Amino acid sequence: MTSPGDATPVKPPPSFSPGVARVASPSRYPEEHESTQSIDVQLAETQSASSSTPPLSATISDLPNRSGSPHSRSGRSSTPHLARSSIGSPFDGRADGSEDIRSLIIRSFSPTIAVHASEDTDDLVRNKGFKGGFWELIRPFGETVSGKVVIRDSIGSSRAWEDYGVRFVSFKGIGKATPSRDSGPLAQMEEVLKKQLDSSEGLMGASIRTKDVLGFPAATPLFKSYLQQLLCAAPAAPHETFGHPVANVIAISSRNPAPLESLRQLYADSTTGDRHLPDWVHQEYLRYYVLVHDEERDDITESTKLYDQMKRHFGLHCHLLRLRSSQCVVTDDDSVQVPRCEWLSPSEHLSGAETLVDLGTDGTPYLFDSDATAIRAFIRELVVQSVIPFMENKVAVWNDQVASRRRGISGRFISMSKRWAFGSSSRSSMGSSGGGNYDSTQHFYTPDSPEAVLRKMADFAFMLRDWKLSTSTYEMIRSDFGNDKAWKYHAGAHEMCAVSMLLNPLATSAKIKLDSVDQLFETACYSYLTRCSDAPHALRCLSLAVELLKSRGGSATESAAKWAMRVMDFGLVGSVGQILYTERVAACYASKTPVGAAKWGGRRRKAGMWSTLAADQWLKAGKPTLASACLEEAERLYADVLEADGVFPMPEMQNFVDNLRHAIKVEYLEARGFDARDDSPTEDPLDTEEISEKLDKRNHRRSLIGLPVQLDAGALNPQGPRDPENPNDDFERA
Amino acid sequence: MSYYFTILSPTDTPLFNIAFGTSKGGGDGIARFRFPETAQYMNQFIIHSSLDILEEAQWTNGAMYLKHIDTYPPAAAYISAFLTPSGARFLLLHQPPHLPSSTSTGSGLGSSSLLGSAGSTTRASSSSVAANPTSPQTEEAVRQFMNEVYENYVKTAMSPFYKQGMEIKSPVFRTRVTAAGKKWL
């Protein structure tokens, strides 16, 4: 990402007429200390030296800070709880930016591993304080596999990934679509959003907007959490195999009286029993056997013997996991906190919302260090030695047996003949049922039909991050689905085709045709929405389009903005979601950086406009903190394009922005009014030094400063209220 | 179809503003924008934001009339631009009329119309200019309009009482622009 974020503001290209001299507008973000000094002086003057520092500082520092400044950034990192963890974002340590979102998207499509544990194993784990049993214990550890994971792609070159993860799901949960609790996932997500907003405002009212290192608007934690929920909201579905298990972990414990027998029982359960997976799930997944050894109650020699026996029976895919069976509490010597689950579906967010509030107190359970290490080692072994090789192998086999046949001349001929022969006679009457392997009554392909296998292969390749292969495979099958009128498959293949095209790092932006990507998204979206009326998937598709195109940069950001507007147009998101997407449009435009010597091609005005609109909407939603953050963002964006500081050339715009600023200020102070009284004594010492940092940055803060003096310090200010007309002429034209 | 026409100085200061409606197809020449009365600032925001595009387009296009350069999809607003040699920019925002069903929220964001799909109009469906903002006929009509305004602008700017960069207050100019709007749009 190249972004001259911290550089001096870029002037727009000189306008047509050479006759009009363009006075270089004063830099709003003075890097040098001299200028900050002068602004300080100026400020001091305009403040008429009213020595009401304590109340002033209390109010000012409560205002969402300008995180663009290096000072406040350093301040933020020292107090991370203020900003981001209030939302429970797990990304505290990382720099924000489009790379981050990209990685988020990549990680969201990780292999699913089912966990099927025996009763005694679950009992053992429940003793340790995990109500959900074995699955709940290992789930958070699966989201990041420790160490690098090396994956070989289809042409044999290998690449190491730091951030590989797998998703553990409870075996019982797969395919059983959770009985929709009176609302779809989208409504639930909206609900979660509202909750998060309330809790974050209620907790500290701190700014939850962050910026990446370069000062560019990054995704807010709020949006990130929204995106994460969106990406894992969809339950396992026939038309894509991301939710289908790649492997099944079958676990027994050393307490089990008849271990081999119960392993067999669990295996039978998963294949034939009443718990077996839906028909559309491919049955050829990896079985992995785990023996959980109770370190405290059972004999390790017994367990080792049993483990050897398991190895003889089931081959290499076995693991002996040694855990202590007693519950760990915080006060234990070697207690470590269980990492938080990153990928929680909206409904889980809703049911577990209370842990969000009392974060870090007693909501999250603790584990012994030795246990955590053992689980990490187990997961690493499971992924690196079994799951990845299994998937690589499958991809290679399917590529060889199914895909290459399709790619060959005969395959083309077959698909052509199929299309034409059936097409002429039976297009209308039996086209869908007669032609292909698509079961049009139940709406899925049988798992072993070539179409389903190819889709699975493409998904595997995608999860192995071999986007080149997945692109070509999706490309190959996407028209087949259309011919069979399997619309959901059709949409899914188009969506993933475009996504893997965009993710492929080798395909440079020049190489891939943005038009064709747009076309793919368009088709996918149409199929999802109009043909299947599947709003969650459509929203996912469009959001992926927005984020990936945005991370492409250049001219792609404009279509990213277009898709974000489309999301709002389609009404796929609720009222809070609308605002989030308005912010996204602004972010898309803001990320388009001017290029070349002439410095044109920026979209600062557009970004500023959308930011202002977002501020307006946040205000209407009663969130003045966020509104204020957006407005500042807008000011920052407008700074480069406006002639004079904060003075819009157009009167009505000026008027609107002035009014908006005033309204935000008033509401903000009203909201803070109660808070400030409550906790001002504690906040004061903390904030006194921050005030200078904030003030020296921009002099147009004056207006915001003016009012607090008037409101809060009315009694304290020795000089009494300042001159009354001052608070209103916000935009310091003076 | 509603129009919002602005002349911007090279430093982005508006020199002249006028809002008018179509007079073709039985239109009464009164602007009816999709924004509620309280949100008329949106026109200026949209015009202002399209300067981004204009500044890019002016280097890639040799002509004075840049045609349709920008769109604001949530309100189906289209921007056409015209450059004068002196650096003043003519920007015309045109917006097909409200669809009866579409309800725009406060800032005009909630309107349910899609990009370009707002072609069917109620009032002025007979007129090709109003029917499709990106059609060649519209482009041509806007070009004619722009040329006529340009001619008048030059005359106004040559007035000894007019200094470059001043707001154009001449009532004659205003009536001429209105007449041009009536004639072509």
Image (cartoon, coloured by chain):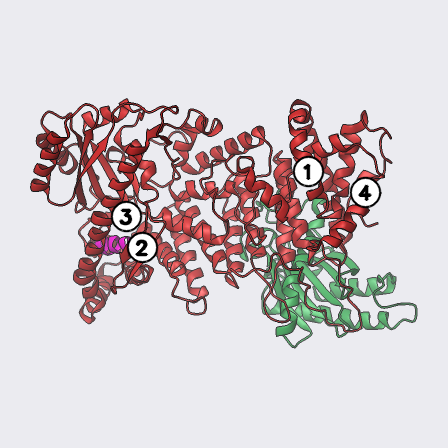
In the rendered structure, the colour chosen for chain A is: red
Q: Position of residue A137 (x, y in %)?
A: 30, 32
Amino acid residing under circle 2:
Phe
In the rendered structure, the colour chosen for chain B is: green
Q: Which mark is on residue B44?
A: none
Q: Label 2 belongs to which residue?
A: A462
Mark toward the viewer: 4 or 2: 4
Q: Are marks 1 and 4 on the same chain?
A: yes
Mark found first going from the N terminus, 4 or 2? 4
Q: Label 4 belongs to which residue?
A: A44
Marks 4/2: CA–CA distance: 59 Å
Which chain letter goes with mark 1?
A
Q: Which residues are magenta?
A: A450-461
Q: Label 1 belongs to which residue?
A: A689
Q: Are marks 3 and 1 on the same chain?
A: yes
Where disc 4 sits, the SS reads: helix
Q: Residues within 10 Å of mark 2 (few under 14, many from 20)?
A: many
Mark found first going from the N terminus, 3 or 2? 3
**Res. A305 in view:** yes
Marks 3/2: CA–CA distance: 11 Å
